[in-house]
Amino acid sequence: MRQQGKLSEWDDARGFGFVQPNGGGERCFVHIRAFTARDRRPALGDVITYEVKPDARRRLNAVGVRFALQRSGARGTASKSTGHGPDRLPRTPIALVFLAGVVAAMFGGFLPPWVPAVYLGLSGVTYLAYWQDKAAAQRDRQRTPENVLQMLALFGGWPGALIAQATLRHKNRKVSFQVTFWVVVVVNLAGLVWIASGGLATT
């Protein structure tokens, strides 16, 4: 039997919270994986419909979760998509073109050799960090803090982050994360321009 309730608690970074049924009653644990449509992230106060299923410890879990109302207040409809919607930003091409440009700039004498090495190395590390974080989210294990992912991007791992966001479909639709991410990219590029203009040259 389906019930309707409101998300009374929601931790978006960890992907879970609690739903309070309409009309009162015991609240249920709800995980991001229980949502049948992933076209948007849940948020505190969202109205959802769900079924209740006890786990091995007899704790109540919401399963088969659907959004009952859209953010605008309109009644939601069931989505036919089982995954994320299309990501129109060409993240992987942007990353690959940038990395190729950095390597070309090195051969042209505009950048020291350590610069492309840093970008390539940290991109690999950052991709692995995204992969580990997504795997942890799927298995309900300890997540990689978002500030760690952003710091890796700041110091040169953002091309790897873009590739991970595109191929793993991870962190590519969380608005607050993306806003911070692109600010970090701009700051990193500003630093790269400073280096290319001789900012680290010694006299």
Image (cartoon, rainbow, N blue to C red):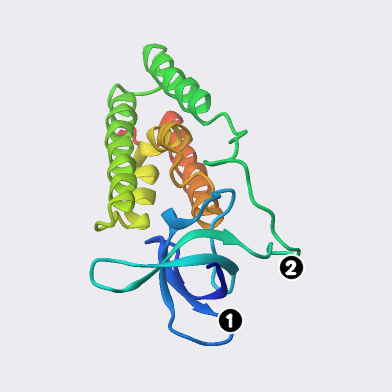
Mark 2 vs mark 1, CA separation in Å: 17 Å
Q: In the picture shown, does residue 178 fall above or below 107?
A: below
Under tag 1, what secondary structure?
loop
Are discs 2 and 1 less than 8 Å apart at CB?
Answer: no
- Is residue 52 shown left or right of residue 155? right
Q: Is residue 56 above or below residue 106?
A: below
Q: Position of residue 71 (x, y in %)?
A: 68, 64
Q: Residue at x 32, y 57 (%)?
A: 145
Question: Would you say residue 110 is visible in this rendering?
Answer: no
Classify mark 2: helix, strand or loop: loop
Q: Residue at x 33, y 49 (%)?
A: 138
Can you identify the residue that label 1 sits on? 22
Q: Amino acid at mark 2?
A: Gly
Q: Quadrant of residue 160?
A: top left
Give the left or right position of residue 69, taking residue 170 as reference: right
Q: Position of residue 163 (x, y in %)?
A: 43, 31
Image quarter of the C terminus: top left
Q: Nearer the viewer, mark 2 or mark 1?
A: 1
Q: Residue at x 35, y 49 (%)?
A: 149
**What amino acid is labelled 1 in the image?**
Asn
Which sits earlier in the primary sequence, circle 2 or circle 1?
1
Q: Residue furthest top?
A: 107
Q: Looking at the image, which is closer to me, 149 or 131?
A: 131
Q: In this figure, which residue is indicated by the disc labeled 2?
A: 73
